[in-house]
Amino acid sequence: MKDQTSLRFKIADQDWEFEAIHRLNYKTFVEEIPQHGPEGSGLLVDKFHSENTYAICMEGDRLVGMVAMRGNRPFSLEKKLPRLDDYLPEGRKVLEVRLLSVEREYRNGYVFRGLLELVVTKGKAQGFNLAIISGTTRQERLYRHLGFVPFGPLVGTGDALFQPMYLTLEVMEEKSKDIFTPARPSGEEVLPVSFLPGPVDVSTAVREAFDAKPVSHRASAFQTEFRAVKKRLRELVGAQHVEILLGTGSLANDVVAGQLSLLEQPGLILSNGEFGQRLIDHATRFGLEFKALQLDWGEAWNPDQVREFVEAHPQAQWLWGVHCETSTGVLNDLDHLRELCARQQLKLCLDCISSVGTVPVNLDGVYLATCVSGKGLSSYAGLSMVFYNHEVQPAPRRLPRYLDLGFYAAQNGIPFTQSSNLLAALNTALKGTAWPERFERLRTLSASLRARLREMGYHIIAEKAHTSPAVVTLELPPGLSSRTVGWRLQKAGYLLSHRSEYLLNRNWIQICLMGDFSPEKLDELLQLLRLYQPRRPGVEPDVPLAAAQA
């Protein structure tokens, strides 16, 4: 069986690809299926070649599979079967699919599924909702299994007999989960690879540290490791203090809201995505007095606009925003905000949950900032952190015990039961990471990933803004469902973020480079994404399929 990870699917657009198509066309429909008589060139140029769009499968520079699609009337089948529309469901936009050909050694189902998936994706994006084929009688059973409905008499002659068949969009969508999930070699264990923003994949060393026997949070060994972890965290971001909480980033942001409530002063919140909106929710639930500047999702904080907003509210004493807006990947300008807040004497608070560990972060001069263990720090989810650069005091009459940052500080950071397993895993992740090299690696991989996605025709959210190298958010075209694509990739062993309501509502899907992964797995993911590539760059969505070729 051929190595499936070396295959890629695309729309043909190069002269040498078209020549390879003509050669495979000859090999299949002259030498294997005697539909045309032999002649010496070894090339068979289809009579509708100038109108065809070809979905092809390549291994390196070798063409191993192809199929042609064409939306122009009259169809090839109409010359063999007059009054074609009498056989078809009414009210349909029809696409003719022809010339399916796969090299013998690649006829394991994977190439066929990939080609058909690409045809369906392209056709659906252009509004086609019914495909017709002349299926060779040798493969009629397969076509029926895929949902094709036979109609009319056989066409062709001799050993080249074909059954006219059609496939509706509804049937295709019903069967798609079985048809289009990329096949794996028999007996191969499929271990999911996480490109989620959390939980992330962790290294073997981190897993082994987590699997150690639990230790009491009162034991001296735990407290020694606890102090070492806090030191490494402070050094990573340049903060004077940090408290480690047993909980998620939502807990950490509630702790920040609790500290802001003690100020009893109005403040400002900046939002340009889902997690900025969540800060507004945290503040609202805590009864904070604030004004919010809400920008479009994917739009970065504009320095002049933020300055004008701050100057318009001179009574504000604090400002809260998200450093890396995970929903879009926008990396907001921390340095400008720090300078502005220092000039206006505002206490700056930041959600750094998706930025710490993925980009250099300097929290010098920041009043409060939050982070978690299960994203850029490449450990297990379950621990969150609040960084600060001032003295804090317990507030027993104002705050719940679990949300009182001063209470943590007064108890040397361990007022409640902690998880030695989560702490050991985080310590191992911190010790085992050379941060400058990690940041450079993420920057390089992200640049390559974005370039390859653009080449496939994907629309990357916030492409014009300054974005995090660890978050790539894709907006899929109307012909592609983020729910369906995400589910299919998950079944193939690749976890991408798509299930959150805010992603589903916008038909977005995300590739996140936060945990432990190999470039080879990222390459494999991109090869699968070629099955769903929306269109070639430069081809507008409303261009007919027949025109979408070089």
Image: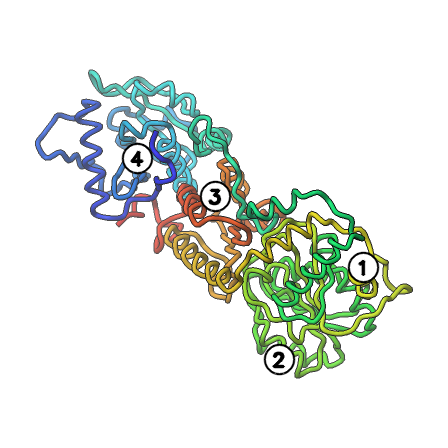
Please, what secondary structure does the residue beneath circle 3 have?
A: loop
| Among numbered discs 1 and 4, the one appearing first in the sequence | 4
- Residue 433 in the image, given as x and y percentages of width and height: 55, 58
Height in image: 544 above or below 410?
A: above
Real-space Cα separation, disc 3 to disc 4, in angstroms:
20 Å
| Among numbered discs 3 and 4, the one appearing first in the sequence | 4
* Label ID, residue 403: 1
Residue kind at label 1, given as amino acid type:
Leu
Real-space Cα separation, disc 1 to disc 4, in angstroms:
61 Å
| Among numbered discs 2 and 4, the one appearing first in the sequence | 4
Residue holding disc 2 = 339
Height in image: 200 above or below 105?
A: below
Residue 48 shows in the view: yes
Q: Residue at x 46, y 26 (%)?
A: 187
Q: Nearer the viewer, mark 1 or mark 4?
A: 1
Real-space Cα separation, disc 3 to disc 1, in angstroms:
43 Å
Please, what secondary structure does the residue beneath circle 2 have?
A: helix
Q: Is residue 383 left or right of residue 189?
A: right
| Among numbered discs 2 and 3, the one appearing first in the sequence | 2
Height in image: 154 above or below 218?
A: above
